[in-house]
Image (cartoon, coloured by chain):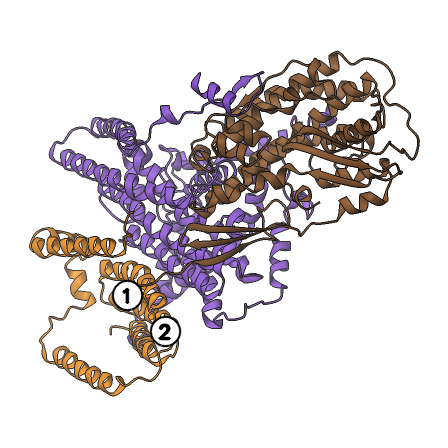
Chain colours: A brown, B orange, C purple
Amino acid sequence: MTTAAEPYVLNIGPQHPSTHGVFRLRVVMDGERIQDIDMVVGYLHRSMEKLAEERTYTQNIPFTDRTDYLAAMSNNLGYCLAVERLAGVEVPERAQFLRVIFAELQRLASHSMANGTFINDAGAWQTPLMYMFREREKILDLFEMTCGARLTTNYMRIGGVSFDPPPEFYPAVEALIGELPERIAEYTELLVDNEILIARARGVGVLSAADAINGSITGPMLRASGVPWDLRKADPYCAYEKFDFEIPVGQNGDCYDRFMVRLEEMRQSVRIIRQALDGLPSGSHKTEIPLALRPAPGEAYARVEGPRGELGFYVVSDGGPAPARFHIRAPSLINLSLLRQMAVGASLPDAIVALGSTDIVVGEIDR
Amino acid sequence: MTSIGIAIGFYALAGLAIGSSLLVFLTRNLLHAVIFAILAFIGMAGLFVTLSADFLAVSQIMIYAGAISVLLVFAVMLTPYASRDNGNSLFAPAGVLVGLGFAALIGFIATQVAWPAFTGGDLEAQNFTGTVRTIGSALLGDYALPFELASVLLLAALVGAIALVREDER
Amino acid sequence: MRAALDPIRIRVPMSTGGMIASAITLVVLLGAAAGVGFLVLSGALDGRWYDFRDLGVGMAHLTEWLDEQNAGQSEATRALLGDHWMSWITSALIGGIGILSFVGGVLLILIWVERRLIARIQVRRGPNRLGPYGLLQPLADAIKLIQKEVLIPEGADRFLFFLPPILVFIPGLLVWGPVPWAPNMAYLDLNVGVLYLIAISSLATVAIFIAGWSSNNHYALLGAMRTVAMMISYEIPLGMALISVVLLAGSMQLSEIVAWQAQHYAWMAFLIPFSLFTFFFASTAELNRTPNDIAEAESEIVAGFHTEYSGMKFGLFYAVELGNAVAVAAFVTAFFLGGWSLFGLELFIPGYIIFATKVAAGYFVLVWLRGTLPRFRLDQLMAFAWKYLIPITIAHTTLVAAEVTAMGALALPGVIELGVVAAVNLAFTVWVMRRWARFLGYRPETERVMQPKLTTQVGGLQAAERMRASS
């Protein structure tokens, strides 16, 4: 007697503890093997790009906070760079250094969250997440001290930053980067040689260098696959060429390497912040620009190395106070497109771990 | 029955065993039938306890109620035409006849064979502490051959089951 | 600013009132200990009904007294009801009510303990709003769960949906019977106690499967199948680990096993460490706790077999899981950690307090594991059970059987025998575990973490090739 087996469809999400947001994954499974996955996005679409066409350039900065809500500073920075390129606005040096400090602090916070939730997906009941949240809380306190908000910071302005950090900011950030290396060492000790984590994440979700480049992957995922590409070195923006840091490159392209690359990037961020603080010049923190900035007609594209990858902003001006077209190149969406390749043929827990290692933020995917 | 307690216990357990067994083929839903079968197994284990067969009772629970019930549930789940219905079938009259015949056979054996009778007093006089040692030495002494044959049979069943469900490695 | 940035350095403020109170408590405790020591040493407690070190002695006196009352009854009553009906009914009532209230109380307290402990491991506080130190949290949880709407998914079989929480609670209650709290304090001291424990814990398997099946839900069925596969795989190493204990102690009766450990001043943990490890690990699989909680992996299949259960039904599953964790801690204590014995100190400290302390320590280890380790994948778990644990357990059991036979044949002093056994077993454990893992393909040196390389040159595919070639 032959028994027939037919694949069944499992629906993960949109409400699910581990899809990192409202994001739906239809998985066609044969027993425990995945045959096909189908990603349904759009649950968080807020039509920001269209709304931006009705608002002035400065009024659009809060929109960029809310796309990638875990890396608001990087979003702000990219957008301001694009508009500055479009309008030809000069940024004072103090503002550039401040921008670097806050972008790297944001990278630290975002990578803490990314690594924490990745290990949460691997099953460790939020303990490493809680440990990494200690630092993130302190960083968010610093943000609140400077610009009044923890998550949606709205800090950068076209021509600089909005506020000069208050005097109590500097000792606080010194204390933070003083204790961060030992905290990162603590995580390393707890997690890096952990047999269970190695068993769960080694060899899972492997992407070769060629696959990654062909799929337009950027960010820690690309670097974990072995390609040494970082926009802060390749296309330096905003005073990054003045700092001395290295970029970590993985070897296997699996989830474990992505985790290690993010951990190492946290260490490098601490280095950059240290150098920026030491060399912080005095001066004004922003250039004055008109209230309704009307750049000359044209287009500009600026890209920054966000915590998730290449975050690009494409702004088109037609001479009016509002942009004619505003588009965000969201790294999460493009990194996600290779999930299918990573997950098909694997089992469901492996697919979840692979999804965790892509570090997506659905706000960015759907905009 | 040396006391009313033991009498109550025996009748309750016997009622449980017989009643659950009856319900096994009287319920419509096959999975309910499995639940009643588990109850019947537990009743049997209780009856073993009243006969001071401690090892048998606990093994009955461990093997039947613990493992074979899972097997039964899997079997019900995977049977294609079960349709979760234990309803009328053409086999009902034949089944009742076979059942009655079987009951007559077992009743004949139970009543006509001269079973050696032990009471609690007899066991106490022999300093009875438990059946485990006796069963153990019997299994490895007098009954070693059937014991080994049984394990070989189980091994054959295990290997056969795995061979049946293995997918072709491509 | 400094204090706000350092939430980890927690200092417990000790006011003078607090210090005086602690000092007074300490003095009172020392006085009580001295009093107890004097009483014990003067022999004033042995065999009396007020021997608080072992409540079983009091129970024995009560039973004797009741039997005397029984003998004074009329012939007709005695013929009808038997010679011991008063003591039997009394001991049944006391034992039943005792176990029920103990388990109920433990389940309530455990919710609080587990949440606070896990919170502490995760650098947070845990429940601290309801009542002092959050102690009323379990009560609030219970009330919340009881007043929830009873939801039955459409298409679910009502009878089969209601049954599993009950079916899971019954073993959770029954399994506390044989536990020996003190030399005379095991309520259900079966002579096949070990087998009884294995049998009762295997009853939970079918309950979980029916829970998953009757929910009419993909996630639940996936979870139920995973759970059942895992539980029946790990029943074998569990049982075989206990066989070594039974071989050494010579009996399946739990009180005998503990008495053997007390008599030889040797805990089974020293003699057969591999069995302790196997029993502990297999128990976490039976309990569905991290690192083996793939069946209710919250991040993957929402909640496994109890996805569709809400309200008190879910409350029962959750509570029973915690209660079983403490039961496993109790078994580890009884089998491997010497139970109520503490190298002679059980003369002064009541046996049940020693037992309870060890159980608390075992439970703490279980919660510690849960808070720290990620979870294994199901196929890794199964491979571990079948390919790794079972062959080694078989070899270990053979070794222990050989040792027991040798000990019976040669009549050396106990210390030498047990010392040799402990040394041989430890050597065996360490050597076999590594060799067998290597044989199965575990190569730690190739799997060691390859740190990411640091570079300052950027590039594309060719740079990647160059970097890989240069390593």
Res. C227 mark: none
- Residue occupying the far bottom of the picture: B93
Does residue B95 appear to the left or right of A218 in the view shown? left
Q: Chain of mark 1?
A: B
Circle nearer the N terminus (2, 1) = 2
In the picture, which quadrant includes the C terminus of chain C?
top left
Identify residue for label 2.
B30
Circles 2 and 1 on the same chain: yes
Residue B125 in which image quadrant: bottom left
Q: Is B71 situated above or below A118? A: below
* Helix, strand or loop at mark 2: helix
Circle 2 packing at 10 Å, graded few (<14), some (14-19), many (20+), is: many
* Helix, strand or loop at mark 1: helix
Q: Position of residue B69 (x, y in %)?
A: 32, 64
Residue A248 in which image quadrant: top right
Q: Is B92 situated above or below A43? A: below
Q: Residue at x 48, y 22 (%)?
A: C451
Q: Is C20 situated above or below C304? A: above
Q: Chain of mark 2?
A: B
Q: Position of residue A30 (x, y in %)?
A: 41, 54
Amino acid type at circle 1 is Ala
> Foreground residue, B30 or C440?
C440
Does residue B118 appear to the left or right of C391 in the view shown? left
Q: Residue at x 76, y 38 (%)?
A: A64
Q: Residue at x 39, y 37 (%)?
A: C346
Q: Position of residue C436 (x, y in %)?
A: 26, 32
- Calculate the distance from the C-alpha at mark 2 to the C-alpha at mark 1: 23 Å
Res. B45 mark: 1
Circle 1 packing at 10 Å, graded few (<14), some (14-19), many (20+), is: many
Q: Position of residue C271 (x, y in %)?
A: 28, 32
> Foreground residue, A286 or A87?
A87
In front: label 2 or label 1: 2
